[in-house]
Amino acid sequence: MSAVLRPSVEDLRLIGFYLGRVLTGLGLLMLVPLPLAAVLREWNALSALLLGAGIALTLGALADAHLRSRRQLGWSHGMVVVALAWIVGSAVAAVPMHVSGRFADPLAALFEAASALTTTGMSVINDLDHLEASMNLYRHLLQIAGGLGILIVVLALFSAGGSRVSTLYVSEARDERILPNVLRTSRFIARVTVAFGVAGTTALAVALLAAGFGPWRALEHAVSLFFSSFSTGGFSVMQSSMIAYHAPAVEVVVLLIMFAGMLSFGLHHAVWRGDVAEVRRHVETRTLALVGTSLLVLLTVGLVRSGTYGDVTAILRRGLFTLVSAISSTGHQVNAGDTYLSDWGVLAPAALVGAMAIGGMASSTAGGIKALRVALAVKAVVHDIRRFLLPESAVVVTTYHVGRRRILRPDVSRAATTVLLLYVVSFLLGTMVALTYGGLDVTQALFEAVSVGANIGISIGVVQPGMPSWLQLVYVVQMLLGRLEFVAVLVLVGYLLSFVRTPRRRRRPS
Amino acid sequence: MVVGRERFTPRADVRGVATVVAVGLGMLGVAAAVVAGVVAVLRLAGVGA
Amino acid sequence: MSGAAGTSGGAAGGTVGPRGGRTRWALLGAVALLVALVGLASALDRAAPRAERSAPAIADLPAPVLDAPIPCRRSDPDEVVTALADRLRPGRITAAIVVACPRLFDGREVVHVGEVVGDVLRRDGGAWVTLNDDPYALELGPFGAHRERAGFNTGLSVWLPDGLHEDLGPAGRHGRRGAVLRVEGVLRRADPADGGGLTVRAVSAEVLAPSTPVTAPVDRTLATAAGVAALTAAAAGLHARRRRRG
């Protein structure tokens, strides 16, 4: 059965109404740094943010006034709203950035906004180290908004689609009513975020004070670091990212926050309920433990063999940190990106690429293919191999544990492998486009494409102000596809195509 | 995952954060052990500077 | 959804009415709106006041040791790296040159000139600073006062033992250009004291230009546009409220 029927004006109205709500939220978010801008007399930043807020809130209010509808938000509407929220949201969020003058052109501003909202964390900003504090707060707020937003979407919307959803979010409820789901889910996500926020920001502030920061700067960095680490986004206050801190305590706290951010919210829910055993049983924990350990071994061998680092401390503080940053899809860096190419040998960067591609857990803010899909794809392959090897009459059943033991059904494993392949296609496409420019090494092209397509944000140096525009555009598309896990964008494309298709005859749903 | 039907207390919040932190620290410990082990093996094998 | 017809999304055989025209207009309107947004933002960016550069007055800035960064790899044989060393002129290193081939400079005595940015982290008998050597630091001054775009910030971490960091003044950030420092020291590609970080351990430091406040001219056009946008939003909000009530 086709997911998309030709949308009517009523459908567009409904979509427009909810998109308006998203824009209102974005506008309110832009107001948050205003008091800071006023206190610090960052008048131009204040104007830029106020302009953006005014535009977003105007659009939101007009949508609210004229597009109200009594209809229920259905699943395919929800998908289109989600896709548009990130696309249109990026465009509107880019306005304050563009007028600040710090971006080479509108595309660069869009890149930055999309990078923020998709929690990728790659930046093309000019002179970050002299950026207004209010503008930097804005960048980090976009990350936490994008991260939490995708969480709500994934938990409430994707999972409500049930088995027809090719993103594969295992759901208990075949819930047709989207909104009640969204509200319930948001409350829990808010709860967890605030809990980690309080603990994380406090711990960071203490560690930063101990590291030599003044009290206000410690607070600024603590809040920013929490936003970008928990959302697994990866923006930073300084261009030098995590290099600027020189403090193991800060790095450990950030590691823990990144870990919390990449955990499936299903697991957070289990932990909140007191069901700690679920952590051990969950297929994603096991997958990431196995994959993470393997990649860590490869990374360590690579670093030692190439002579990059010889002592355990350096391998932990540079290698392990970067690996966790990659798997969690945060993107914080403790090395200058160019040194992955010039100083890390070949095996270690390859391990990083693998970590980035696999990504974190489903139902979290993490990016990448997701551990759940990797696990299911591998199980599917093993399942098929077993079927070949065993006699024809044997019944082969493969199971996995998410909340409870589940049987691996063909449609589920098919969905997992399909999206996995789509990610790989995205990575390869990004690599190819980068290589067409010449002057780039395969390692650089692949590294950057995977980092962008999996919403990681670790840069080997390709992404920078003044980078080629076509490549920048491809990266924006990759970021959005990756964040939305392809489905929402495909539904949107289906909607758009339906306008192009000439109406031959009415299609009846099968 | 059925979310949001429960009512959580602040105690659950504290316990939740503490559990995640504990698991995270445990994983860091394991990672450190793995790295130390690999480095030791490589040194024995004469690999690396 | 799973077999459920007539739920949502305009099921059951499509929809009726002259929707083709209206939906097309709606979509075109949305696209036009986005284009207008981009146009407005670009116009405002171009209308921003262009101020003077606040270039630091640095006398005798040494030339970089290389005209351009020369990349190398870990796998390159030692002879290749030694040959590169022969091409180094006397002068200062830059972050770009070093990260292209950290091996080349490991353990070498170097001269680095840069702006102190971010924070001076005083602890353990000294201070960590980040010295930026990008165009904003050494030529143009911080972005904001001027609007010349010159790419990313680039810099190196420098450890200043006690005695070298006391007179730096506030570090560079928005509204301030930090002190421009000339340090001599040893570059460590994987400094054990920094858990493997790339650092310069300074033995001497000289302030070439002091920390200076920098003001960005207030962009009146932008402020006006922001005011108009705010008022429009307020009006739209009232309009929406009235329609909700009515």
Image: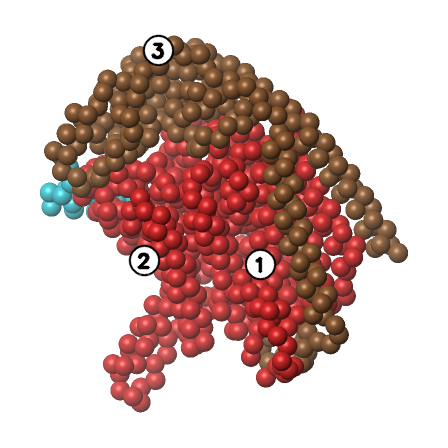
A389 sits to left or right of C133 = left
Residue identified by numbered label 2 = A290
Query: In the shown orientation, is residue A501 left or right of residue C221?
Result: left
Q: CA distance from mark 1 to mark 3?
A: 55 Å
Between label 1 and label 3, give the one nearer the viewer: 3
Q: Are marks 1 and 3 in contact (CB under 8 Å)?
A: no
Which residue is identified by label 1? A83
Percent position of residue C117, x then y? 45, 23
Q: Which residue is mark 3?
A: C60
> Given this view, does label 1 or label 2 mark the residue nearer the observer?
1
Q: How is the image coloured?
A: by chain
Q: Residues within 10 Å of mark 3 (few under 14, many from 20)?
A: few
Q: Which amino acid is tagged 1?
A: Ala
**Picture coordinates of residue A370 (x, y %)?**
42, 59
Q: Are marks 3 and 2 on the same chain?
A: no
Residue plotted at (35% across, 48% down): A437
Asked whether residue A97 is in view, the answer is: yes
Residue A27 percent coordinates (x, y): 67, 44
In percent of the image, x 65 and y 81: which residue is there?
A506
Tell me which chain appears brown.
C
To which chain does the residue with label 1 belong?
A
* Contact (Cβ within 8 Å) of mark 3 with mark 2: no
Quadrant that contains the N terminus of chain C: bottom right
Chain-order first, disc 1 or disc 2 = 1
Q: Which amino acid lies under the numbered mark 3 shown in the image of this protein?
A: Asp
